[in-house]
Image (cartoon, rainbow, N blue to C red):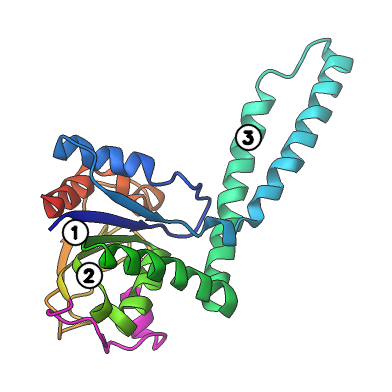
Amino acid sequence: MKRVIVTIHGTGRTTPDFWAPQVQAIAEHLGHTPPHRPVWWGDLIDVGAKVWHVADWLNARVHTLARVLLGRPARRTPRRIARAADFLHRLMNGIAGVLAFFVFKHQRAQMYERLRATLRELTHHGYEIVLVSESLGCLVAFDVLRAEANQYNLLAWVTLGCALRILVQSNRRSNDLGAITPQTLKQWINVYAPRDPVAAPIASVFPNFPIRDERLDGARTRLEAHNYWRDPRVAALIAHLLK
């Protein structure tokens, strides 16, 4: 049976082609490009896109002032403004994603349905599915699978930077796995970095399922720790599941 990877991203500034470098990294381990289906919901939270209109206006104003006062364009300013705009875009979308999932039911339902539709289609066509979820995408996937994992042909689920431990301990989610059983999901691998402020081992939180916690050391900052796809061990792990 043919295997396919399904990826669902987390919150922040995420473009429709977020999956491209991820699939390329996996392909380097496999020696070929694997079948892949992304689940993108970045359009539901892209409030930060407006930042770039302000950045364009600010660039134009600064260039005008530089020509008037210095007689030449401002050379370094565009790069600085672009870095600041990118940071604000990511920050605003990060907040918007959390609000969309935890507060706004309509947007949360859309996230669920995009994942469900992908899993239904691939199951219908007879694929074995390796689901990879990252950050807030882990919570989207958890809610969907807990309700209906028995409807899909799931080979493995890889959670990257998963906040489920925090949610269970704060009573935002139950440790009842519902439809997630060893019969409906063959493997669940949870990858976490100690410096990641939202991730943690979760095997002890869900004692009724044999979750394999994989610790990733080496990140120097919290931001670097939460960017799991930069670590080649992640792509190697997923490639092994696809073989």
Residue 232: % across, % down: 22, 42
Residue count near mark 3 (Cα–Cα under 10 Å), binned few <14, some 14–19, many ≥20: some
Residue extending furthest toward the front: 125
Q: Tags 2 and 1 in contact by the CB under 8 Å rule?
A: yes
Q: In this orientation, which residue lies closer to the viewer: 55 or 155? A: 155
Residue count near mark 2 (Cα–Cα under 10 Å), binned few <14, some 14–19, many ≥20: many
For badge 2, the amino acid type reads: Pro
Residue 208: % across, % down: 15, 86
Give how far apart the Cα atoms at labels 3 and 1 are.
34 Å
Instruction: Find residue 82 and report its image quarter.
Output: top right
Residue extending furthest toward the top: 71
- Segment colored magenta: 164-184
Residue appearing at x 53%, y 50% in the figure? 13
Residue count near mark 1 (Cα–Cα under 10 Å), binned few <14, some 14–19, many ≥20: few
For badge 3, the amino acid type reads: Ala
Residue bearing mark 3: 82
| Mark 1, secondary structure of its residue | strand
Answer whether residue 171 is magenta in the image: yes
Question: Which mark identifies residue 201?
Answer: 2
Give how far apart the Cα atoms at labels 2 and 3 are.
36 Å
Residue bearing mark 1: 215
Residue appearing at x 26%, y 73% in the figure? 152
Residue 84: % across, % down: 62, 40
